Image: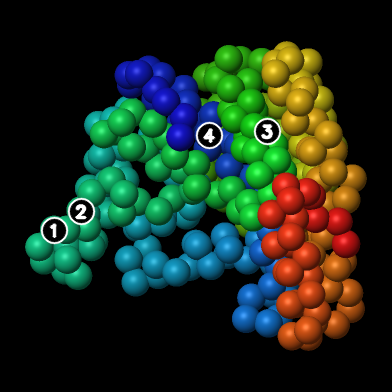
Amino acid sequence: NLPFRDDGEFALLHSAVRVVLPLIPALAASSPVMEGRITGMKDTRLEAYRTNQDLVPSIVGGVIPEAVYSRREYEERILEPMYRDIAPLDPEGILSDEWLNSRGAIACFDRNTIEIRLIDTQECASMDTAVAAAVYYLVRGLVEGFFTAPLALRRVSTELLRGILDRAVRDGGDAFIGERDYLGLFGLDSKPRKASFIWRLLAGSLAERYPEMRAYIPRLDIIAEEGTLSDRILRGLGGGVTRDSIIREYSRLASCLDGDLPYRP
């Protein structure tokens, strides 16, 4: 949950969060297996997340929230259509509240925060905290104009952001990103790069600007060098997925959680 004070801060924070969302699966993808099979998605949780409310599509939208920059605009373009669409299924109006919104980041005006919901972390406390820290400092860097003028964040289209997110959900850190309008927001040229490499560049720059982030770099380096948790789980499972191999690797993962250790197959 990232706080804002007024419409001005909301506009700045919301524009930065929208830009960061497509990169999150490249760092946090943790779910390559579902119901005993490899799905072909590095972030199966997010693939399910964006399709599990198809009966009322306006609840999740396109995962990347619309480009809105005031409370009034948010209510008119996001909340009110959602409440209208759910009404036939909710005659008592129980669900007509901000928390019904299932986009990848949601505005909570009752407490003046934006909640980021795309982080698929389930490894151990220190790794999960490092992922959260990377996301936080990247949003902060964008808000503070470290990479580009904050108003430039508004120029990137929602469709472009959703396209990058789709690739990151499928490929995790192996997703290639070459959109000039997007990479330029981070001070990068348009040379296509793997998302994992982009994260490594950004993390290094952010650690120079924010010394308190340096403590997280060793954990983030594990992801940069060995892959997301999803990549590492797939390596641990090997070529074939069986009930026994799933039990073995996820038991090891549970031990990592218990001992606060990174999972390394």
Q: Secondary structure at mark 2?
A: loop
- Image coordinates for residue 56, horizontal then vertical, percent: 32, 66
Q: x, y (%) of residue 217?
A: 80, 31
Marks 2 and 4, how far apart at CA: 24 Å
Mark 1–mark 4 Cα distance, whole angstroms, equals 30 Å
Q: Are marks 1 and 2 in contact (CB under 8 Å)?
A: yes
Q: Is residue 244 left or right of residue 105?
A: right
Judging depth in this view, the residue of 2 and 107 nearest the camera is: 2
Residue behind mark 3: 134
Picture disc at residue 96 = 2
Q: State left or right for residue 164 relative to residue 215.
A: left
Q: Nearer the viewer, residue 253 or 224?
A: 253
Compared to residue 173, the image places residue 91 above or below, namely below
State which tag comes first along the sequence, 3 or 2. 2
What residue sits right under mark 4 in the picture? 17
C-alpha distance separating marks 3 and 2: 33 Å
* Mark closer to the observer (3, 2): 3
| Residue at far front of view | 259
Q: Element type at marker 1?
A: loop
Determine whether label 3 and label 2 are within 8 Å by CB. Answer: no
Please state which of the two labelled residues, at mark 1 or mark 4, is closer to the viewer: 1
Identity, as a three-letter code, of the amino acid under mark 4: Val
**Residue 23 visible in the picture:** no
The circle on residue 48 is: none
Residue 93 marker: 1
The structure residue drawn at horizontal position 40% and vertical position 42%, both measured from the top left corner, is 106
Q: Is any atom of residue 61 visible in this view? A: yes
Alpha-carbon neighbours of circle 4 within 10 Å: few (<14), some, or many (≥20)?
Answer: many
